[in-house]
Image (spheres, rainbow, N blue to C red):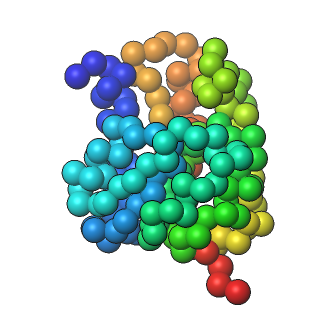
Amino acid sequence: MNKYESYRQKRYKKTLHFLEKHVPKGTKILDLGTRNPFSEIMEQNDYTVYNTEGEDLDVDFKKINQKDAELVTAFEIFEHLFAPFNILQEIKADKMIVSIPLKLWFAEAYWGKDDWDKHYHEFEPKQLDFLLKRTGWKIIDSEKWTSSNPWKIGVRPILRHFYPRYYIVYCEKIKD
C-alpha cells in the first residue's frame, strides 16, 4: 500500500466508524456521486449501496429519489456543487450523513483542471450546519478530525496535524 492509499484508508476507517455508529447494517443507502472505493467498503460492511451516475446534481435531481433509499450519504460532494441548497431540499430520505473538507485559513480552495474537479465551496462547520438547518435537517451528531500527510514537510503539513480538515454530520429530516 502506497503512502497516499494509507492516508485515504485512515479517512475511510473514520467515516465507516461514524456510519456504523448511526446506521444499522442492511440499510439502503444512496451515495451521492459516482461509484468509488468507499461505496465498495460500505457494501463489504453489509450496506446496500446505490450511487448517482455522474449527472449534474446542481440541475438534475431525478436520481436522488428513485431508489427508495433509507439514508443518503454525501461524502465530500457538496463542495463541488454550485448550489447544495437545492439538492438538500429535494432529498426525500429521512436520514443523511454528510462529510466535507473544511475551509482552512492557511490553504486555498482546491481548484483542479477539470470542471468537475473544483471546490466551489469550502465550508466552516457553522456554514454547513446553517445550510442543513435552512433545508429542513436537524443535526444529531457530528465529528471533526485532522488529516496530515506524513510524507510531506513544511508549515502547512505541520498545521494539518492540529487543525481539523474534515467534518462529518449525521442528520435527520425535520418532520412538519
Picture quarter with the N terminus: top left
Camera-side residue: 110 or 7? 110
Quarter-of-image position of residue 36: top left
The residue at 67%/31% (across/down) is 119
Q: Nearer the viewer, residue 65 or 151?
A: 65
Rendered location of residue 62, percent (x, y): 60, 56
Position of residue 25 measured from the top left corner of the image (x, y, whole percent): 27, 67
Residue 79 higher or lower than 29, as above or below: above
Q: Position of residue 47 (x, y in %)?
A: 29, 60
Could you tell me if residue 164 is visible in this image? no
Q: Quadrant of the C terminus?
A: bottom right
| Residue 83 drawn above or below residue 104 | below
Quarter of the image for residue 110 reads top right
Which residue is pictured at 65% across the width and 79% down the height? 174
Residue at point 49% right, 13% down?
A: 153
Drawn side of residue 78 relative to residue 49, left or right: right
How many labels sit on residues?
Answer: 0
Q: Residue at x 55, y 13 (%)?
A: 154
Residue that sits furthest to the bottom in the current view: 176
* Residue 137 appears anywhere in the view: yes
x then y, percent, for residue 81: 68, 41
Q: Is residue 153 left or right of residue 8?
A: right
